[in-house]
């Protein structure tokens, strides 16, 4: 089963206070912060993350697709909203019944369309809670690794430890 998370980028930026503040001063900075947060999320969950940013009001926008930090980043073309792109992509991805597709947005109308297409919805707040929980798990694992870092026996295969112990006893 392949798992996908489609993210309405500007919707999440405007829903998360830290990113909203950053976006008021520098929208590019807010986008980069969101990408960084979701790259860490992807590396921990293994979920394919697709972030969609609106460019429908940008005159002459051709649309752009790039891969960055293991994420797929989409900038829609002129006259195409993030919602319409996400709806089309959900339809494509849910054709394969083995795909699990979730959409992160707090747009109620978009959530209803997504649910009708066979995907699950997750609000910006719920995604924020998931991201924080994963950040805490990463910190715990890092702390665990640091605590065990100095003990060679903790990093060796049990058979190797057994062989070394037998060798030590014969010396």
Image (tube, rainbow, N blue to C red):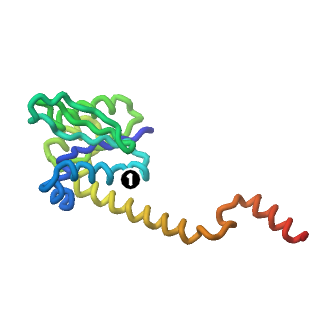
The quarter holding residue 56 reads top left
The residue sitting at 43% across, 53% down in the picture is: 44
Residue at position x 69%, y 60% in the image? 156
Q: Position of residue 46 (x, y in %)?
A: 43, 46
Q: How many marks?
A: 1
Question: Can you name the residue that lies furthest to the right here?
Answer: 170
Front-most of residues 1 and 124: 124
Q: Residue at x 28, y 34 (%)?
A: 90
Q: Image check: 93 left or right of 137?
A: left
The relative height of residue 47 versus residue 169 in the rendered view (above or below) is above
Instruction: Using the rendered view, name the quadrant where residue 154 is placed.
Output: bottom right
Q: Is residue 108 left or right of residue 68?
A: left
Please indicate whether residue 159 sits to the left or right of residue 111 in the image: right
Give the residue at mark 1.
40
Of 112 and 43, nearer the camera is: 43
Q: Position of residue 128 (x, y in %)?
A: 27, 58
């Amino acid at each position: 089963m392949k798992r996908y998370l489609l993210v309405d980028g500007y919707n999440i930026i405007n829903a998360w206070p830290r990113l909203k503040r950053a976006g008021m001063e520098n929208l590019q900075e807010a986008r980069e912060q969101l990408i960084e947060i979701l790259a860490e999320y992807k590396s921990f969950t293994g979920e394919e993350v697709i972030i969609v940013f609106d460019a429908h009001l940008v005159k002459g926008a051709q649309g752009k697709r790039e891969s960055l930090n293991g994420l797929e980043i989409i900038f829609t073309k002129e006259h195409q909203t993030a919602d319409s792109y996400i709806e089309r992509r959900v339809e494509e991805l849910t054709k394969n019944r083995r795909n699990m597709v979730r959409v992160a947005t707090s747009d109620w109308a978009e959530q209803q369309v997504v649910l009708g297409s066979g995907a699950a919805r997750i609000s910006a707040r719920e995604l924020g809670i998931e991201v924080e929980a994963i950040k805490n798990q990463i910190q715990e694992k890092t702390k665990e690794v640091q605590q065990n870092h100095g003990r060679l026996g903790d990093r060796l295969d049990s058979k190797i430890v057994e062989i070394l112990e037998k060798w030590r006893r014969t010396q």
